[in-house]
Image: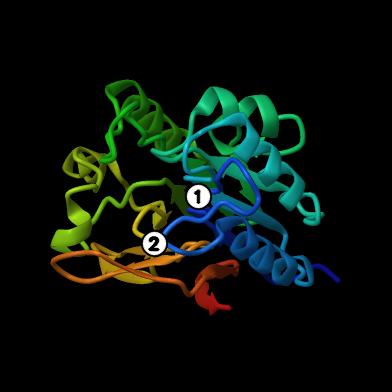
């Protein structure tokens, strides 16, 4: 009997360093990623979304470590780059076994998942360029699916002064082209669990597998780790934040 839902895990912002024992903010990012992946490997997800900043420096060695870590996951893994990633290095190591979401229109049952590229080289904030805005407009118009999830790295909605300096700069342009089909926008980048509802669109930020940022005016580091789990039913979805 076919499941009445699809089950998706979102992981993000692992910030893997070149060597397994390298530390960042006093923690070992690879150890934390491995903890999350071992937990996810025991679950029956249909696929995994990895929403950027896989590496901290974008070096080949870190992507090789990520490739090895992800090998325990048997389900399809779709990824997008973040501002810390170097896409050419990411693709060189991961594209053989895993799936760049920007190259795929992923449709499962009643839901479609569309990548929205937001990364600008050498910048920590984000931007959807005119070509990608036009591409998204066309995808939304032509989609035969009435329930669409947009997947991006940068946050397109205000969260706090400490994080909003790094948000999507042309979020207004993005919002102007969204239509009734868009039900959910998921993203990483902000290193914590946030959820909002605006104009009948749900926005969900995913915690980092490495460490969280806290603080309204200034950022502090919290070493706890987590990910998000989504259940997509024919006419609705549910979200659960999993802390480890």
The image position of residue 101, as x and y in percent, is: 57, 38
The image position of residue 224, as x and y in percent, is: 48, 75
Query: The C terminus is located in which quarter?
Result: bottom right
167 on left or right of 13: left
User: Is residue 73 something that shows in the picture?
Assistant: yes
The image position of residue 235, as x and y in percent, is: 53, 68
Q: CA distance from mark 2 to mark 1?
A: 11 Å
10 Å crowding of disc 2: few (<14), some (14-19), many (20+): many
The image position of residue 44, as x and y in percent, is: 77, 69
Determine which residue is flagged by label 2.
Answer: 191
Q: Nearer the viewer, residue 186 or 133?
A: 186
Q: Tell me which residue sits at (17%, 49%) in the image.
A: 165
Does dot 2 land on a helix, a strand or a loop?
A: loop
Seen as rendered, the residue at the extreme right is 1
Determine which residue is flagged by label 1.
Answer: 15
Are the residues at dot 2 and dot 1 in contact (C-beta closer than 8 Å)?
no
Q: Is residue 202 above or below residue 74?
A: below
122 on left or right of 48: left
110 on left or right of 215: right
User: Is residue 6 something that shows in the picture?
Assistant: no
Between circles 2 and 1, the one closer to the viewer is 1
Return the disc, 2 or 1, that comes first in the chain's sequence: 1
Does dot 1 land on a helix, a strand or a loop?
A: loop
Residue 230 is drawn in which quadrant?
bottom right
Q: Tell me which residue sits at (30%, 52%) in the image.
A: 155
Query: The N terminus is located in which quarter?
Result: bottom right
10 Å crowding of disc 1: few (<14), some (14-19), many (20+): many
Q: Nearer the viewer, residue 221 or 42?
A: 221
């Amino acid at each position: 009997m076919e499941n009445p839902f699809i089950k998706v895990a979102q992981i993000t912002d692992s910030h893997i360093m070149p060597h397994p024992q390298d530390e960042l903010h006093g923690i070992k990012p690879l150890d934390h990623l491995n903890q999350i992946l071992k937990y996810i490997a025991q679950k029956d997800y249909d696929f995994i979304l990895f929403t950027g900043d896989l590496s901290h420096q974008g070096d080949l060695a870190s992507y090789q470590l990520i490739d090895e870590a992800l090998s325990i996951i048997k389900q399809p893994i779709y990824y997008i780059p973040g501002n810390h990633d170097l896409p050419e290095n990411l693709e060189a190591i991961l594209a053989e076994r895993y799936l760049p979401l920007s190259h795929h229109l992923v449709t499962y049952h009643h839901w479609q998942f569309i990548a929205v590229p937001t990364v600008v080289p050498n910048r920590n904030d984000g931007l959807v360029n005119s070509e990608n805005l036009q591409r998204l407009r066309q995808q939304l118009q032509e989609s035969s699916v009435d329930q669409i999830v947009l997947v991006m790295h940068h946050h397109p909605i205000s969260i706090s002064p400490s994080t909003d300096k790094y948000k999507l700069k042309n979020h207004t342009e993005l919002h102007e082209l969204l239509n009734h089909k868009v039900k959910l926008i998921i993203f990483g980048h902000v290193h914590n669990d946030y959820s909002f509802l605006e104009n009948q669109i749900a926005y969900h930020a995913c915690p980092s597998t490495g460490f969280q940022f806290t603080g309204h005016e200034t950022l502090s580091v919290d070493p706890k780790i987590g990910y998000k789990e989504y259940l997509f039913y024919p006419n609705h979805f549910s979200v659960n934040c999993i802390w480890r």
